[in-house]
Structure formats: C-alpha cells, structure tokens
Image (cartoon, rainbow, N blue to C red):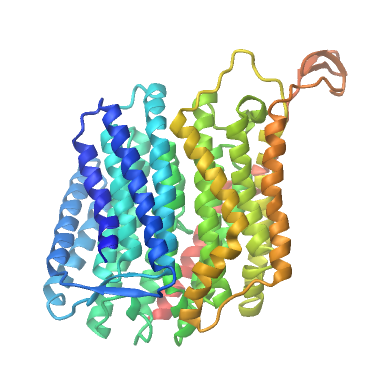
Amino acid sequence: MNILLLLIMFPFVVAFVLLGLPTRQYAVRKYIVVASALILSGVSIYLAAQYISGGPQYFSFDAKGADMAILFAEMVFAGIIIRLSLKHKQYLTALLMLIGVALMLGYEIGLAETVHAREILFVDNLSLIMALIIGVIGCIIALFALGYMKDYHEHHPEVKDRTGFFFFIIFAFLGAMYGVVFANSLIWLFGFWEITTLCSFFLIGYSQKDDATKNAFNALKMNLLGGIGFAGAIIFLAYNDQVTQLNQLNGLSSLLPIGLLAFAGLTKAAQMPFSSWLLGAMVAPTPVSALLHSSAMVKAGVYMIIRLSPVFAFENGGAAVGVLVALVGAVTFVMTSFMAIAQSDAKRVLAYSTIANLGLIVVCAGVGTYQLYWAAIMLVIFHAIAKSLLFLSVGSVEHNLGERSIEHMDGLISIMPKVAVGMAIGILGMFLAPFGMLISKWAALEGLVNANAALTIFVAFGGAATLFFWGKWLGKITMVKSAPTDFKAKVSRLEGISLGSLAVMTVLVCLTFPLISRYFLEPLIADIYNQTYLLGQSNVAILLLMMGLMLILPLTLLRSGKRSYREQYLAGANTAKEQFHGSLGTTHSLTMRSFYLSNIFGEAKLFGISVVISIILIVIMIGVGL
C-alpha cells in the first residue's frame, strides 16, 4: 500500500515544488524533472515486479480524513473553474460545475456518514499495466517537454512563458492518473477523475490565446458533463445498493449506474458525440497532445469502460448496455477512421486516429467476452506507446520545418532520418499492431464473430480506412529527395533520448507481446472469467514474422536516409534536379500529393451524422438501465 500512496502523492509534491520555482530556473527545473521522472518510472517497474503474480490485492485504512481532503480539493477546484467561467462568460461551464458540486455535497451530507468504502486502494494486473504506461510513457513525455517547451517559447514569443506552471500541471496529471488506476473507493476515483479534467483544461489553454481558451472550455464542458454522470452513479449506488467500491459493481439491482459510469467513460475517452474536445486539444503544445492521447485523460476513459467490461458480460441486462456501448465505439471507430483520411494536418490525423483506436477498444470492452477483454488491453498498450512516439515526432518535425502538414513531410527521411525512422516505427506499430495483430484475424475479430458478428462489419471498414491513411503518410516520409543545403535539424538531447526510447519500446513490445499476454493478461482474465485467451502457436509464429518487419524496415530506412537523390525520368525533359519540361514547354517541379477525398470523407460530410447516431445510442443506453 505504501508504494501505491507514494506513486499517487509523490507527483503532487513534485508539482508544487516546480510551481514554486522562478520561471528562468531552467537548470534546476531540468534536474528536478529528470530525477522525478526516473523515480516514478523505477517505482512503477518495481511495483509491477512485486505484484504481477499476486492476484488482486485490496488495502483498507481509515480514509475519512482523506475523503474530506478530496471533497475540500473539489470545492477549491470548483471555485477556480466557476471564477474562470464567469470571467470568460462561459456560463454553461459554471452551471455544470455547480451541479457536480451540489451532487457531491448532497452525497457527503446525506450518505457519507452511513455508507463507507472499506477497501480504499487496490492493485491488479490491469492497474499494473496502466501504472507502467503512466510511469514510463508519461515520464518520457515529461522529459521530452523539457527541450520542447524551450523551443516552443522561442517559436512563440507572443505566449507568456509559464513553464513552471506547465510542469506543475504535468506532474499533477500523472499523480491523478495513478489515483484513478489504484482507487477502489468510488469517491477517491471520482476525485482523481475530476483532477484529470481540471489538468486537461489548463494544459489545453496553456497559451491563453482565444482559440486555446475556447477549446479548453469545450473540453471542460464535455468532461464535466461526464463527471455529473459519474457523481449520479455514486449517489445511486450508495443509496440503493450500499455500494461504494469499484469491486462491488457485480450483482447490482439496477444497471442505471453502470450506464452512467459508461457515459462518463465515453466522454473522457472522446467518443462520439464528445470527440470534438480532443480535436480541439490539438492547439496545446505537442507534449500535451501526447500526454492526453497516450498515457492520461483518454486512457482514463477506456480504463473505466474496461473495468465495466465483466459487468457487461455477466450481469442480467448488462449485455444490452454493453452492446450499446460497443455500438458507440463502433460508430466512432468507423467514422473517425474515414475522417482521418481527409486530414492533412499531422496532429489532426493523429487526433482522429486516436479517437478511432479508442473506439475500437470500447467495442472490445463493451462486448465484454474474455477474448475481447484481452484484445482491449493489448490495444491500450500498443496505442499508448506508438501514439506518444508519433505525437512527439510530429512536434520535433514542426519545430524544424515550421510546418506540421503531411504535404510538407516529403523526403523527411533525407533531412531528419532518425526522426523519420521513429515516425515510421510508430506508424507501423499502429497499423501492424492493432490491425494486423489483433483485429484482422485474431483476438478481436475472432471474439466479435463469436459474440456479435454484426460488429465485424464496422471493424472491417474502419480497419481498411486505417490502413489507407497510415499507408499514405508512411509513403510521404520515406520517399528519398535531395536535402536543402542550408537545412540543419535541431533536436535536443532529451528529445532525441525520448524519441529513441519510445521507438525501441514499440519494437520490444511488439516482439514480446506473447510474454505480456502470459504474465500480465492471462492471470487477470483467468481470475475474472475463469478461463483465458491463449494464442495458438501458429498465430504466434505468424505474428512474430510480421513483427520482424519492425526490425528490418527501420534499418533499411536509416540506410535510405544516407542516400542522395538520383536523377530520374520525370515525364518530360529534365531541366534540373527534381524539375522537368512539360508537354507545353512549361517547367514543373517534382511533387507528390496524397489523396484526401475530403468531398467524400470530410468532416462536413460525416461529423454531423456521426454525432446524431451516437447521441441516439447513448440515450438508449441510459434508457436500458432505467
């Protein structure tokens, strides 16, 4: 238990230390961030080693004082949000905050004295996996941010340098995420859940520009709405079933609280119709995008849905709620995968692909069978590593090229070979791991065929779109072109270490996934379902062969980065390097354009109908629980 409390509290202590540092104390901040990141990563790994084979363990202690402290913190946060909302005339945000506060005060006054959580914290293999994602990937993002934020303010002198506040929020975010994955008390879980909402608000609005402030409030409104659903579930559970713990959700008299908790998870996971908050978060500095998408915030949302997965599978009527949750995920997966095709902004492609992959996880968790439970967790692991690598790589490219459009990444392998190889590994990890490894023929698709064959249609079409938009991006960055003579890439040492670490981790996790399955997933699934999912030896052999490409291709690409452009026939008389005379005697430059098909897959075509369908599904989901 002491290790769990350390992982929860230590980041908050570091956060306040960093907040107190003067803005220009770069060296001191660097040492504190590096040391703290190493400690959190090391303790997370140690925790996994200690508890991996012990099964679920629950910890009881007198938490009344802590409960009051959490309530007090919520009141302080509410005051801050209401004040800022009134300042910016965001009256709906203030109202949603007031409703959430009123619900929790009502719980504290009417029920807290009679209903108590006994087992406050817990740890199982899913908690350990999430802790490793938070502690390792989250800390790598924090290290990357040290170099990135310095460059960020050089590129954006109009933005006030609040780097100390930035790292304060980053570490508070990490502490809150540890709290989310270790909390068994629903009150504790809700408190940390709301802290992640507050942290995302401040990170998205970091620049304090009008568009950043607007998008920050948009994210806040949607997540406060989910928080109201969460608070309603807590009150309902305590009043009707005397339930105050996450491990008590089986055997409920009503499925309404399960629907409300699923609703909260869907909002935080940016599923339709709530995806716009995550798209708007792209205005934030790149480390924020990486943190929100890979190891925090949205992962809290899918974590909640995965925790509810056994309820969907086992409870009477739970399957109906679970199928509706899965349908929301399926619609999100298909529609956002197609909308990603129409995007040329690299961060926007990553945002849509994140929402799509989270939708796929929701599909698996919503159906709730043991095969799909396995698939959902494996998707979380692969997505967390590969997506953080891609976001950070795009951040480095943007600072060097002054652009983040995919159309400006022609020949990236020639001018920034190491970063380009890292991006290629991330892209391969995305469509080889979730599409080829899990969805195409094995766990997820097999599980869906057995449990709900209709959902395989969504997976097939969404998977095809996924392959298309990743493939065309990969082609852009790996084409060999002549490098500008005056170009010199600038990637700081910490940025390079962070990108290299994530690239190596992507390859290693792809190669060692059978071990991850055996030691982390199979004991967890056996404990819940009394059976487990075992990959056949032939499937493992095929998958390892596929993963071999993850080793061969990067080595080939690094060699390509050393090649110079060779003159070739360009559909006309060549006049200079990468130029030619056309049929009418005009001179053209060599260009390669991607297909975006925005008139077919653009947001204007698909977003509105996706929102309508998903709202209908969510309303039905809540109605089924009544």
Q: Position of residue 526 (x, y in %)?
A: 50, 79
Q: Report whether 516 appears left or right of 146.
A: right
At 65% from the left edge and 79% from the top edge, which residue is drawn? Answer: 450
Q: Nearer the viewer, residue 563 or 584?
A: 563
Residue 283 visible here: no
Q: Position of residue 318 (x, y in %)?
A: 46, 81
Q: Position of residue 391 (x, y in %)?
A: 50, 41
Q: Position of residue 306 (x, y in %)?
A: 45, 69
At 67% from the left edge and 40% from the top edge, which residue is drawn? Answer: 554
State which quadrant residue 68 falls in.
bottom left
Quadrant position of the C terminus in the picture: bottom left
State which quadrant residue 242 falls in.
bottom left
Number of numbered discs present?
0
Q: Report whether 625 appears left or right of 325.
A: left
Q: Report whether 393 appears left or right of 155.
A: right
Quadrant position of the N terminus in the picture: bottom left
Q: Compared to 81, does 441 lie above or below? A: below
At 72% from the left edge and 31% from the top edge, which residue is drawn? Answer: 560
